[in-house]
Image (cartoon, rainbow, N blue to C red):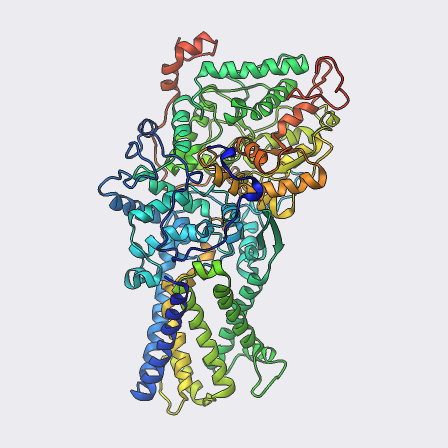
Amino acid sequence: MNAWVSVFSALFAVIFLVLAALLGVAALGLNGVFAIYIPYLASFIFLIGVVVRLVQWGRIPVPFAIPTTGGQGITLPWFKTAYFDSPHNLLGVIGRMAAEVLLFRSLFRNVKGEVREGPGLTFASSKWLWLAGILFHYAFLTIVVRHMRFFLEPVPSVIELLTSVDGFFQILVPTVFLTDIAFLVAAGYLFLRRVVIPQMRYLSLPADYFALFLILGIGISGVLMRQFIKVDLLKVKELTVSLANFHPVMPDGIGLIFYVHLFLVSCLMAYFPFSKLMHAPGVFLSPTRNLANDTRMRRHINPWNYPVKVHTYEEYEDEFRAKMKEVGIPVEKE
Amino acid sequence: MSLESLPKPEDLKIDLKLPQKPWLDQPVNFKPGTYSYPGAAKNLRYLDLANPRGWSPTDEDWKLPDNWQEIILKGFKERLGKYRSFRLFMDTCVRCGACADKCHFFLGGGDPKNMPVLRAELLRSVYRNDFTLLGRMLGRMAGARELTVDVLKEWFYYFFQCTECRRCSVFCPYGIDTAEITMIGRELLNLVGLNINWVIEPAANCFRTGNHLGIPPHGLIDMWEFCVDDIENVTGIKVELPVNKKGAEVLMVTPSGDYFADPGTYTFMGYLMLFHELGLDYTWSTYASEGGNFGLFTSHEMIKRLNAKIYAEAKRLGVKWILGGECGHMWRVIHEYMDTMNGPADFLEEPVSPITGTKFENAKSTKMVHITEFTSDLLKHGKLNLDPSRNDHIRVTYHDSCNPARAAGLMDEPRYVIKHVCNNFFEMPESTIRENTFCCGGGAGLGNDENIEMRMRGGFPRANAVKYVRDKHQVNRLLCMCAIDRATLSTLMEYWAPDVSVGGIHELLANALIMKGEGKRTTDLRGDPLPGMEDEEDV
């Protein structure tokens, strides 16, 4: 797959989805399909898909404890242990997982290695990927939580508060959310590094671009809807609350852009369980991170451990007995 | 192949240019100097491995079984169901590329398929094609491809171009471990008889004779007694050499590299002198005369088959616990696999140092203690009489071997010993030590002569850091805690950083160790004059 073929095939796929929503609603009048049936179906696929995948993963045994140790392990009492990077008990593992999931610990370690003439090699701390990653994920989370105001009536005060903090600077009317900007900038950076860095471009698959374009499409349509192509938010809320209560009603006159936004979100949800996006739940199960470095203290059990063919001492001595006796090595059978 | 066949270090180009073709279509090129020779049929037969035959990677026809595809896909499926690690690592990678410049082979060679992410994609592309919905539906658009002979050849080339060092795994946000990918990749290759002789011959030897080099018991005695004589020459003391001694308190197991060749032998002499000085009630074993385990580079089953002899011998001899020598991948096997595979070791006792009474709580289940843990404890309790100035002619840096660092977290113990036994110790840059340490370039069975170019390339990041401390602090000795390192780093230094010799930690300890009743020492264990003794007669 040529790199540009990958980029454009993913781009066209997302454009196709946008056109499908536009056509479906504007030309064919399938408002109900795009606003009710597809979101329900997508949510169903998302939930069932993620649960099925987690159960599949969970049922596979972990035959060996293979933590990657990122620091000094537990040893004699006067050595300082890296309590979280090389944890030896449950608390340490919880700490390591929390740092991984909440702070992207491993990505934070990133050091860029660069080959120079000579040849030589230099290293420099490089936190851009970490920064973009963490901005992207936290912005995404905040946006999802903010959107709860469309599904809950009355809106919980926590979400009101979050929304007002997010719009604290009150730039433009209506107020631009900081997380919207962060989200688009971070996702944009993640896309750009994929096409600009030659090695990244070489290894990226259409699926990598597709997920990014889909997410960017959701972000852009959302911002457009809020700032530029206004839709009737009261009607939107009427629909979303009714969806949340499983008594869907289909109000008339919601702007087209809303259907595009909702359809892309539906696509993302339906795509999620079958894609690399499963890294989100997957990280919790990773055996190099969620197991303690206590393998000489506590025996890890392999449920499928089976007997293997070994070369016994008896077979060994039978082959070498005469020579062993000659040089005075004690033997079992004289 | 030898070092002379390579261009001069300054002319060894690291070509970062990417192939025109996408990686899915770019076939592998077996260039001399970058691959290892295949496993000899006799070794495969001895270990009951599949498809023993004569073949070469450069042949068009690899003489595979007719149904090789079926065998591999069946093995693939089986492993997806047996290893959660494997399944997750197939599913969760987002190709963020954080691993790319962490691999020493990529940094030293520039081949994009040595970026850990693409190494794993070699398996993932087949996984998608045969085991996932999207891959079946979308084919190449989903990055899926059929398992063809060309793909298999790629697997062979790149899974034997990974040293299972786990450096990328430290930086991966999901903990994806290329060592695990490579181990399972090699396991699959072994199902159709694809492996390399530098792995399979030591494994076969170890299975039969107890050590990688195939040394029979009487040969071991010769080698070990040779070391005893050398010690007597340097110290005037004839140390004990207990072998297969029943009822000893401790069984000592070390990699055969420690007694087979210089500079490992000096470390081995170090153990002998230390144990003699302590009056430790211990024994060597001829049957379990190998700490290393080339099963780790073959298959999980082979790890277990080779490792079994250690507990079996401990049981037969009736020792209380086991002590392990300076070895790298051995410590991954001991620390992460041995107890699970061949335990529980309920016939042994929780290890307690007979000299200090210290309980080694961290080894209470496996009952196997690392020599630097044991020695650190002695030093902490002041049990050794040392003169570190005897090592003043040696300016030291320390290379963390991959597995003790990233699969066990053994990092401060060796440094503690080093700091006690010498006065000139300098760390290499932070990005190249401890959990960030770089491989020697020849681990996981790749330290053979025919693979010399890849070794020198893979070892380049490590060598570059050594060069840095050599130039800055006049370092002239690279210490390491691994028998493979001691063999491969010596060549690596010869190529990249001449004037730096390689050795083990207990060699320096033995130099500094003041033994009861020793004669006046004029040389170190290598026969080099001690500082201030340059003019002595017998030098």
Q: Report which quarter residue B92 is drawn in.
A: bottom left
- The residue located at (33%, 74%) in the rendering is A41
Percent coordinates x, y for residue B19 in the rendering:
42, 55
In the image, is residue A135 above or below residue A298? below
- Which of these two is toward me, B396 or A251? B396
* Residue B27 vs residue A42, the one in the foreground: B27
Instruction: Find residue A226 and report its horizontal and vertical position in percent.
Output: 50, 85
In the drawing, does residue B196 fall left or right of residue B484? left
Estimate the x, y position of residue B252 in percent, counting from the top left.
53, 24
Q: Residue furthest left?
A: B66
Q: Is residue A166 visible?
A: yes
Residue B208 spot, x, y in % from top left: 38, 23
Front residue of B260 and B370: B260
The answer to whether residue A152 is seen in the rendering is no
**Quarter holding the C terminus of chain B?**
top right
What residue lies at 34% left-to-right and 45% top-to-bottom?
B153
Residue at the right extreme of this rendering: B532
Q: Is residue B188 above or below residue B250?
A: below
Q: How many marks?
A: 0
Q: Nearer the viewer, residue A19 or B244?
A: A19
Residue for point 36% across, 15% down: A318
